[in-house]
Amino acid sequence: MAKKIKLKQLAKSDNKCDRCVESKCCQYVTQNIDKPTSIKDFDLLLWQISHRNVHIFKDEEGWFLLIWNQCTHLQLDGRCGIYEVRPLICREHSNDYCEYDVSIEEGSELYFSGYEDLDNYCRKRFKSWDKRFQKKAWRKYA
Ligand code: SF4
Ligand code: SF4
């Protein structure tokens, strides 16, 4: 399931979106992924995060792929080009406490911005991480 990043509630700021010149919540898409547990799961994530603009994070709702890619409907003035018919996920997104207040990285329990980030995490999490390519080892780690 996709999501827009919504964190804890804070005081409402009515003109916050006008001040958010980058329209931060229109700069990415997310996709929920199964919680990775095995070496093989994390090895697959390493492949995915090796692609440009793909990050991974974990928060209280689970694990997500985060793809930094601006929405094609975002206008130069920061407004939505399909405002009247924008998708439900955009309508339901509150600015009470959003990406303008705290970045996705800061609001996540775990955040991986690239291959090295995730590889270092796996190295600490799995003692046998570097042995996964050894002959006949692969099936054991699945
Ligand atoms: S909801 Fe938040 S991130 Fe989105 S445009 Fe408004 S202030 Fe910016
Ligand atoms: S449809 Fe509109 S509100 Fe939704 S992400 Fe695109 S520009 Fe932003």
Image (cartoon, rainbow, N blue to C red):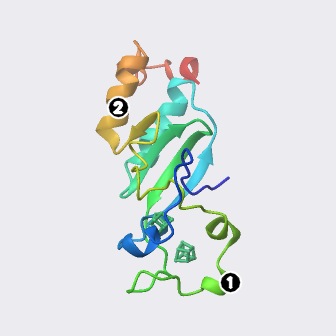
Q: Position of residue 34 (x, y in %)?
A: 64, 38
Residue closer to the observer: 63 or 139: 63
Q: Amino acid at mark 2?
A: Asp
Looking at the rendered structure, the secondary structure element under dot 1 is: helix
| Residue 130, placed above or below residue 91 | above
Residue in the picture at 38% in, 40% down = 112
- In the rendering, which numbered label is found on residue 85? 1
Within the image, what quadrant is residue 118 found in? top left
Residue on which the image places disc 2:
119
Q: Position of residue 45 (x, y in %)?
A: 48, 40
Looking at the rendered structure, the secondary structure element under dot 2 is: helix
- Residue at the left extreme of this rendering: 116
| Residue 22, placed above or below residue 125 | below
Residue in the picture at 57% in, 31% down = 36
Residue in the picture at 39% in, 44% down = 105
- In the rendering, which numbered label is found on residue 60? none
Q: Is residue 80 visible?
A: yes
Question: Would you say the residues marked 1 and 2 are in contact, meaning their CB atoms lie under 8 Å apart?
Answer: no
Within the image, what quadrant is residue 141 found in? top right
Residue in the picture at 57% in, 48% down = 9
Q: Is residue 131 visible?
A: no
Residue closer to the observer: 95 or 114: 95
Residue closer to the observer: 6 or 97: 97
Image quarter in which the C terminus is found: top right
Within the image, what quadrant is residue 77 found in? bottom left
| Residue 36, placed above or below residue 87 | above
Q: Position of residue 116 (x, y in %)?
A: 29, 37
Image side of residue 59 versus residue 84, left or right: left
